[in-house]
Amino acid sequence: MKNGAELNAGSQRLDRIFGGQKMPRGKTKVRYTGIAVGLILCIVCSTCTVHREDTATGKNNAALPPVQFNALVDKATASVGEVITFTLTLNHDPVLSAHLPDAGSLVTGLRIVDDGEEGPRLIDNRMVHTKWYKLQPDVPGSYIIPPVKLSYTDQKGELKELLSPQIFIEVTSGAQDKPSGTDADIIDIKPIQDIPRPLSHLFLSAALVLVLLLVAGIMFWLHHRRTRHLTAAPPKPAHQRAFEELDALNRDQLLEKGIIREYFFRLSEIFRRYIEQRFHIPAVERTTEELLPDIITSREFSSAIKAEIRDILRFADLVKFAKVCPDKNTADSEYRKIVRVIEETREGAAAPNTAGNAPHYSPHPAAN
């Protein structure tokens, strides 16, 4: 009963599939048997097809050598500047150990502008590895890419080598061929053409030249004026500069502060600079013993002034170098001697002794 109910249910489903037509029970069994046979035949055919494909692939792989190595270019003739693609391809059995070599060092005469590689990857049970180089010629001529050597180890562990074919490349200049003996490749020089220039450019150039001349004239006038003023202003006399330096020394009040040695250093330098500027006798950079012979033999000084100069220089050396420490009265006395020598030897001096006529350069007040 149960099998009969299942058979009826299956029959109803088939009736729905095939348009709702009801068939007798005997014909239903025959129909089921035909469908089952058809399904079995489809499965057997598919299996046979796959087996044939696998068998064909196996036969093809079996027909290939264990290692295939090739080198080629996409064009054997090119023009200068045209890119040529050089490709190395390695196809081998996965169980073998093979590595695609680098051929960049073998390419000579052609610039390698780019390079790359693809793989290795498994395709149809074969390992495929590709390297490519973009080559660019700069000079026309014939070029040769020598054979590339590939080393690999076979299934027996022996080292084998393969060489790629030698490649020839012809590079042309790219110029079109023209019949010889004709003037088709000679282009005549064009005649000289006048380029019109608008008047505004001429006016602008003239204005720029005038401005530059005006600026140059003003700079020359200012420079000439400054030079004329500098030339017209005479330098200060030596005695005036010496008295200004003595005033500055007094304002520093070194004696009042007890800085005796520095006071005499500056006092001696002022006096030496006066002698050098007034009488053109080198005095600042010379020692006293080097300077005195020129003072003594000079006709610019009287005997009394020569003695005064000698005493001033030697006493200043005692303070500067022998560490003699004079009191304030002695320092004032040396100051008076220098003022007196400057007054009596200055330019345009009317009398041999005019020290009393210089109230601005009076010595320091006497110590209490």
Image (cartoon, grey):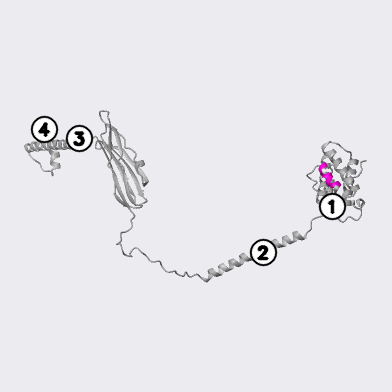
In the displayed orientation, state which residue is furthest to the front.
Answer: 297
Question: What's the magenta region?
Answer: 289-296
Front: mark 4 or 3: 3
Q: Position of residue 85 (x, y in %)?
A: 32, 47
- In the picture provided, is 61 more to the left or to the right than 361? left
Q: Position of residue 358 (x, y in %)?
A: 90, 52
Q: On the image, numbered disc 4 is attached to which residue?
A: 4
Q: CA distance from mark 2 to mark 4?
A: 130 Å
Front: mark 2 or 4: 2
**Are circles 1 and 2 on residues that touch, CB within 8 Å?**
no
Front: mark 1 or 4: 1
- Could you tell me the amino acid type at mark 1? His
Q: On the image, numbered disc 1 is attached to which residue?
A: 239
Within 10 Å of the Cα at label 2, are there few (<14), some (14-19), or many (20+) other Cα atoms?
A: few
- Could you tell me the amino acid type at mark 4? Gly
Whether residue 177 is situated above or below residue 98 in the rendered picture: below
Within 10 Å of the Cα at label 1, are there few (<14), some (14-19), or many (20+) other Cα atoms?
A: many
- In the picture provided, is 298 more to the left or to the right than 152? right
**Are circles 1 and 4 on residues that touch, CB within 8 Å?**
no
Q: Secondary structure at mark 4?
A: helix
Q: CA distance from mark 1 to mark 4?
A: 153 Å
Front: mark 1 or 2: 1
In the displayed orientation, state which residue is furthest to the top.
Answer: 156
Q: On the image, numbered disc 3 is attached to which residue?
A: 62
Q: On the image, numbered disc 2 is attached to which residue?
A: 218
